[in-house]
Image: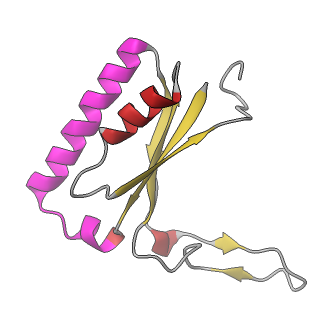
Amino acid sequence: MKYMILMYADPAATEAMTPAERADVFHRHEALHEDLQGTGEMLNGAGLAYPRDTTTLRYGEDGATASRPLTGATEQLTAYYVVDCATPERAREIAGRVLDFHVVAVEVRPVHDAFGMGEG
C-alpha cells in the first residue's frame, strides 16, 4: 500500500535555523532516504517552497485566487514522501523518523490513486 507522509513545520522557524541545525535536518533525511531506498519503500518525495510563494486557488463564482497558504495555521506543509509499505504501522514508523524540533507534525495518509507510481 502506498502512503503519503506529509511533513509540517513553522516556516519562520525554518528560516531561523542555524547552519548546524540545517545540516542536522539534512543528514537525518539523507539517512532516511538511504534506508528506504535500500528497502525499496521510497517512491518519491520533495521539499516544498515557502507558503509565501504559494498560490491557493479556490472554487467560486468569480474564480478568484489568493496568494496565501490554505490555512492560517502556524505550521504549514513543507515536504512530503510517498512510500510503499506492507502495513500502516510501518508507514507510521517511517513518519516517526522525521519528527523533530523542525518537523513538528506528520500526517500519514493512504494513497488510493497512484498515477505514475506503478500498480496501486
Residue that protrudes farthest toward the right in the picture = 61
The magenta segment: 12-39
Residue at the image position 14 percent from the left and 54 percent from the top: 21
**Which image quarter: residue 117?**
top right
- Horizontally, is 69 left or right of 116 in the view? left
**Which image quarter: residue 54?**
bottom right
Residue 107: percent from left, percent from top:
48, 50
Above or below 40: residue 61 = below
Locate the C terminus by quadrant.
top right
Residue at the image position 42 percent from the left and 36 percent from the top: 92
Residue that protrudes farthest toward the bottom in the picture = 62
Identify the main secondary structure in magenta. Answer: helix
Locate the N terminus by quadrant.
top right
Residue 105: percent from left, percent from top:
38, 56
- Horizontally, is 14 left or right of 22 in the view? right
Color scheme of the displayed model: secondary structure
- Queried whether the magenta region covers residue 20, the answer comes back as yes
Residue 103: percent from left, percent from top:
31, 55
The number of numbered badges drawn on the structure is 0
Residue at the image position 70 percent from the left and 28 percent from the top: 116
Residue 79: percent from left, percent from top:
44, 50
| Front one among 64 and 101 | 101
Residue that protrudes farthest toward the left in the picture = 20
Above or below 43: residue 95 = below
- Queried whether the magenta region covers residue 92, the answer comes back as no
